[in-house]
Amino acid sequence: MPIVVVVGGQWGDEGKGRIVDLLARKAKVVARYSAGNNAGHTIVNERGEFKLNLVPAGIFYPEKTCVIGNGVAVDPAVLIGEIERLQANGIDTSRLVLSDRAQLIMPWHIALDKLDEEARGDRAIGTTGKGVGPCFIDKVARRGIRVADLLRAEDLGPRMKSSLEYANRVITRVFGGEPLDFDECFQRYREYGARLAPHIADVQDTIIEAHRRGEYVLLEGAQGSLLDLDHGTYPFVTSSVPSSSSGGAAIGVGIGPTDIQRVVGVFKSYCTRVGNGPFPTELFDETADILRDHGREFGRGEYGTTTGRPRRIGWLDAVAARYSVRFNGLAAVALTRLDVLDNIPTIKICTGYELDGKTIKTFPSRVSTLDHVKPIYEELPGWMTPTTEVRAFDDLPEQAQAFIRRVEELLECPVDLISVGPSREQAVIVNPIF
Ligand code: IMP
Ligand code: MG
């Protein structure tokens, strides 16, 4: 049975949580493999609406094991908060497994995230401020503290001491900030360790054993591929090692690339971005407001799950999307929020960029180039009818079918799933992904 990876194809918030929630029905194990609580999923099901930053969306299904892989940066306070909220809603969290090799977000990472952004001034990345970047910096610098360290005071104490000493030197001497207190941090993290201990394990075993038993395993990426440290719009990217794109999935849970059978990319029917950085198809007119506020009264508008910031909005960028299809090795696209386009008379798709009188079809590496390209649009007639009740491709309005077929051509990848609303059943399955 396959191990399937689900990644976001654009700049995040494509609706991965929703797609994972749907696919999780057949999976036995659902695992997160990268990033941290900068990510956020909103899941709507019969128990209500849930915002999750670390716990995989599979937690709502009984009998499924949910894994937080070694590639994830874990803020233990946030994780404990999520576990408690789920438990308060009657959801069994005993099937949550946290990798002993995952890195921990420490209080100084959060302090450094903010200080670094302030120091960048008008070149700020627009981070979520959760300490994710500084945590991965410490991981690569070999100063990081791992989940396993929480379990033994004799490991945690010295590691925390030297890591905090270094951080305090940076905080005070580079940024002129206030140093953090060791004893307070140490006590707090010891308590987190005691609370999380029942969940801490080696996750490779969980995944490989399930795979060998013939069960489906779903690996979920965080953020969007265009925020990837290597392939994204550097430096306006997120710092995750392993990368958030599909290439990071095997590393992030401790399996090999040949163990993965299929990669599915989630794309919105348009495009959004939060934080700073290039966005060639960004819209500034009333269409942006209409798309942003669609469903806002039901909490479905385009506002960040983690930070509440309004998302920047634009048309679907097929140049960027095809680039993402290629570096993720996508076998299928899940196209989300088709219904948000239900009342848009003319829909545009960017099929190329114009730069200095020339047409380019590949995604430029430089931010300074991306800031200057002019999108070349193809216009398609809208369908101007609700799609929220549609459950079969042939029942979609003709114009919506034409839009999807064009997306497939431009992205060079089949659209296997279409979502037409926030709840589990509001989906059109063209080709079963599992
Ligand atoms: P960081 O990950 O907090 O360091 O933020 C780096 C960039 O990634 C900023 O532009 C954030 O807005 C963006 N970002 C991080 N996580 C997410 C996410 O889950 N969805 C959308 N954007 C994100
Ligand atoms: Mg999100």
Image (tube, rainbow, N blue to C red):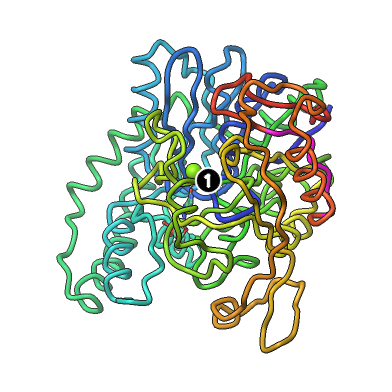
| Residue at the (45%, 65%) spot, across then down | 137
**Is 169 in front, or is 334?**
334
| Residue at the (60%, 37%) spot, across then down | 342
**Segment colored magenta:** 412-418
**Is 301 in front, or is 362?**
301
* 159 to the left or right of 186: right
In the rendered image, residue 27 lying in the magenta stretch gets the answer no
Residue 149 visible to the viewer = no
In the rendered image, residue 415 lying in the magenta stretch gets the answer yes
Asked whether mark 1 lies closer than 8 Å to ligand 2, one says yes
The percent coordinates of residue 200 (x first, y second) are: 49, 31
Q: The C terminus is located in which quarter?
A: top right
Q: Quadrant of residue 52?
A: top left
The percent coordinates of residue 219 (x first, y second) are: 66, 37
Q: The N terminus is located in which quarter?
A: top right
The percent coordinates of residue 306 (x first, y second) are: 38, 44
Tally of numbered tags: 1
Q: Which residue is mark 1?
A: 13
